[in-house]
Amino acid sequence: MGELRSIQSAIFLEIKNKIPENLSFVHEIAELLGLSYDSAYRRIRCEKIVSLEELYKLSTHFGISIDSYFEVKSGKITFDNITVDPNTSSIIDWLQKIYNDISSITSAPDKSMIYAAKDAPFFHFFQIPEIAAFKVFFWEKTLFQFPGYQNKKFSLDEYDDGIQKIGQKILIASTKIPTIEIWNEDTFAIFLRQIEYYWVSGLFKKEGDISIICEQLENWIRHVQFQAEHGFKFLYGHEAIGVADSFQLYENEVVLNDNTILVQIGGHMVTYLTYNVVSLLVTQDQAFCSTIENHMRGLIKKSTLISSSAAKERNRFFNKLIKQVRQFRSRIEMNIE
């Protein structure tokens, strides 16, 4: 019986982490199971074991993999899907789902994140609106192929302020999570290739916009560098205030990253697998998450720390990125002239 109570406690902890902080945990459980608050509390405190019917309702409603708790070796893993359907949803809808997830993480007293970045973690883009504007348009037109975007060209003047607002909320929430990020040179080069593709394809409505983006790219890179130097994240243009050593940045030169994200909340883990560049598959299967954690820790051992006191390696890494931007900008501006 003690083992069942332990499993039940872990299940309710997972559910609590899934519920937005503005909602009442006990109310959500009571309403779903058709119970009084007192009966819901008794189950949450594991004074009463949940029935099979109640377990079924909880697992299906909150998307919980029961296999992992009972150590059932089915070989199957349950994933939640966070993506954009261009016919039924918008980028703002997608960002709101991500914000709901990240808010539940930030509300936990004990949390951390490891991000193996194939390209720059997307919440960094919202530090500077011009950078976010290009990335969002690229997602809408090239990745998701939104209706009406087939002949549309990019313009900074047409960036939706609502997207920037929800993006900033995600960014602010992310600064509150102690994070390890693993980058390599290609992490940034992908972004430059996307800009060049749009330039060569004539997808900039105004020539001046590409010069503005290149200028802001330098500012953006330097801000990531400043955050790495301080060892914590803070907003662009704001005072550098944060928790020491809450941001660790590594450079990996031997393994191509894949945008996998591992989040730890207390003793519980969540894995986010990226597909189609920005869509996410999310699982809380603990056996699977442990495999990902072992891979991540091994990746860190093969990487070089370039944050906090590692000034020489940090400067070398970011100066190389700045050089790439300046060479790209020079090439583009020669064509403009």
Image (cartoon, helix red, strand yellow):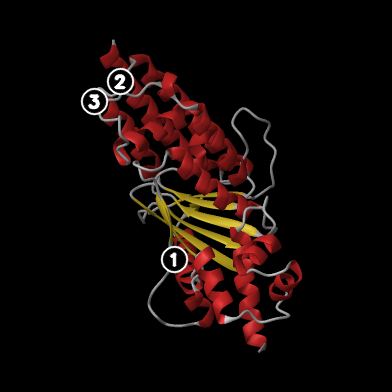
SS at mark 1 in the image: helix
> Relative to the observer, which residue lies in front, 116 or 202?
202
Badge 2 or badge 3: first in the primary sequence: 3
266 sits to left or right of 60 = right
Q: Give the amino acid type for the residue marked by disc 3 in the picture.
A: Val
Judged by depth in the image, the label closer to the viewer, 3 or 1, is 3
Q: What residue type is labelled 1?
A: His
In this view, the residue farthest toward the top is 337
Q: Residue at x 36, y 55 (%)?
A: 254
Q: Residue at (72%, 69%) from the top-left corner?
A: 36
Q: Where is residue 295 in the image (x, y as percent from the top left)?
A: 44, 66
**Label 1, on which residue?**
295
Number of residues whose C-alpha sits closer than 10 Å to that of mark 3, classed few (under 14), some (14–19) or many (20 or more): few
- Sequence-first disc among 3 and 1: 3
Give the residue at the far left of this rendering. Answer: 201
Alpha-carbon distance for marks 2 and 3? 10 Å
The residue to which callout 3 is attached is 200
